[in-house]
Each structure stands twice: as C-alpha cells, then as structure tokens.
C-alpha cells in the first residue's frame, strides 16, 4: 500500500514499461553483409543506398568496413524489416562492372 495515494503497487519486471502491459524494449535484429571479391565499392554503395536506405556516406563506410573486416552491419530493426532488407540485398543482382560477378552479395539476419 502506497500511503500517499492509497493504492497498491506491484514491482515491475525488467520487460514491462510503466503501464505494465508493454515490453520496455523489443528484441532487435540486424542485417550483416559479408565480403566477397565479386563486387566493387560503387556497387556496394549503390546497393546499400537502395536496399537499406543508408546515406551515400554511411554506405561508403560500410563498404570499407566489409572490405577490411569481412563483414559489416548494414541495418537494425524488427525481424520482419530485417528480413525484407536482406531479401532486397539478395535480389539486387550481379555487379555489372565486374564480369566475374555472378550474383548478389551475401547477407544474413542475426539477433542483435
């Protein structure tokens, strides 16, 4: 019993907001892009702008990171949004600048 308001209170769990009915946070997912030798920086930048909604500057930073580190996170969000983003990447097609490019880049949805 709360003496000031004359109402009872119950402790909140970690996953409840102040209303007690909604999670305080939704589990987020991410889309990870993996490096290969079949795509140019220009392709990666254009693809990330089109598929993930990144600015050209952010897309370029991701292109550098995927080249140097072998992978980079290109999108965060709810599971369904990440799946759609990943599908767009997989459907983007080969890099027309490189004759050896045989298809889209590899990306995967992962838990954050």
Image: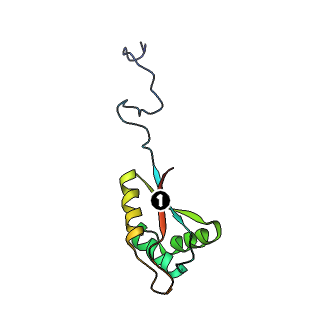
Residue at image mark 1: 108
Q: Is residue 104 positioned above or below 21 on the image?
A: below
Give percent across and percent down for residue 19: 36, 31
**Percent of width and height locating residue 94:** 44, 79
Above or below: residue 65 compared with residue 24: below
- Label total for image: 1
The spot of residue 74 in percent (x, y) is 50, 63
Q: Which one is in front, 42 or 16?
A: 42
- Residue 47: quadrant of the picture: bottom left
Tell me which colouring the rendered structure shows: rainbow
Task: Say which residue appears at 44% left-offset and 33% top-offset.
Answer: 15
**Residue name at image x 46 percent, y 27 percent:** 13
Looking at the rendering, which quadrant does residue 72 occupy?
bottom right
SS for dot 1:
strand
Label 1 CA crowd tier, 10 Å (few <14, some 14–19, many 20+): some
Q: Is 79 placed above or below 39 here?
A: above
């Amino acid at each position: 019993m709360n003496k000031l308001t004359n109402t009872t209170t119950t402790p909140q769990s970690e996953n409840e907001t102040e209303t007690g009915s909604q999670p305080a946070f939704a589990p987020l997912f991410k889309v990870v892009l993996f490096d290969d030798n079949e795509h140019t920086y220009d392709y990666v930048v254009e693809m990330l702008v089109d598929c993930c909604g990144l600015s050209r500057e952010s897309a370029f930073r991701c292109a550098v990171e995927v080249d140097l580190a072998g992978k980079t996170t290109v999108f965060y969000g709810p599971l369904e949004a990440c799946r759609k983003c990943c599908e767009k990447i997989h459907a983007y097609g080969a890099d027309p600048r490189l004759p050896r490019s045989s298809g889209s880049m590899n990306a995967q949805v992962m838990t954050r």
